[in-house]
Image: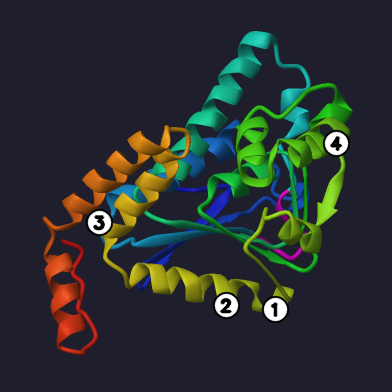
Amino acid sequence: MEYKNILFQVSEGVATIIFNRPKVLNAMNSEVMKELFCALYECEENPSVKSLILTGSGEKAFVAGADISEMRNYTPVEVTKFMEQGQETLRFLETMGKPSIAAVNGFALGGGTEIALACDIRFASENARFGQPEIRIGIMPGWGGTQRLSRIVGAGIAKELILGGGQIDARRAYEIGLVNKVLPQTDLMEEAQKMAGTLASLPGFALKMAKSSINFGYDMSLDNALKLELISVSHCFSTEDQKEGMTAFLEKRKPNFIGK
């Protein structure tokens, strides 16, 4: 697919998706969301892609939110379709078999925060800002913000951010567990690439099983979640990478994982 609103590249097992609408602070509309889904699908289907990074172009914004100029005159039927499109895309990002890193390089508001929440790991530059300001324009989050935010930071803080419609800086985002690490802007992509490279070097099926166990075990009873974990770890023993990993450990050498 030819992308008009994102930049997409793959290097050494790492795919990088860059939101590229700098004139509107990388705001998301239905066309960008479609391109994001296609890029994610390409990552999932391409065996050479082992991990991925999502970031924004420039130093001002990751994604500053949804494109209000497109949304303003939506009917309830039209906005339902748009929100479903966003929910389906971000759920695919969240549950795809390959790990993702959000490198938040500036404003991540509304839909920007929701995209970051759907990633597995979140790094933020020192100038990053997060928030769910939808309430201030008469609506509420619709791409999973009310659900993922509360699961990550707790219901109380999620309500403070969503009901109050305010913003927080990167340091506060780190304090509440919204981001894993805060970095100088100049170091953000280097650190994200380093982490993505580490993930790309690890056995892909084991990563997929571990990610799936975390995602789908979260809302289960502990007994059922442990059963899911048991099944997942057992499946890992069907792979060549498991045999190679354990053999390399015993032989005190670096493993050569092949993704099988």
Pointers 1 and 3 in contact (C-beta within 8 Å): no
Q: State the quadrant of the N terminus.
A: top left
Q: On the image, numbered disc 4 is attached to which residue? A: 165
Q: CA distance from mark 2 to mark 1?
A: 8 Å
**Residue pictured at 49% horizontal, 48% vertical:** 3
Q: Earlier in the sequence, mark 1 or mark 3?
A: 1
Is residue 38 something one can see in this rendering?
Answer: no
Q: CA distance from mark 4 to mark 2?
A: 32 Å
SS type, badge 1: helix
**Residue pictured at 36% horizontal, 68% vertical:** 200
Q: On the image, numbered disc 1 is attached to which residue? A: 186
Asked whether 94 or 223 is in front, the reply is 223
Q: On the image, numbered disc 3 is attached to which residue? A: 205
Pointers 2 and 1 in contact (C-beta within 8 Å): yes
Pointers 3 and 4 in contact (C-beta within 8 Å): no
Q: On the image, numbered disc 2 is attached to which residue? A: 190
Q: Earlier in the sequence, mark 2 or mark 3?
A: 2
Residue type (three-letter) at the residue carrying disc 2: Glu
Q: Position of residue 212 (x, y in %)?
A: 36, 45
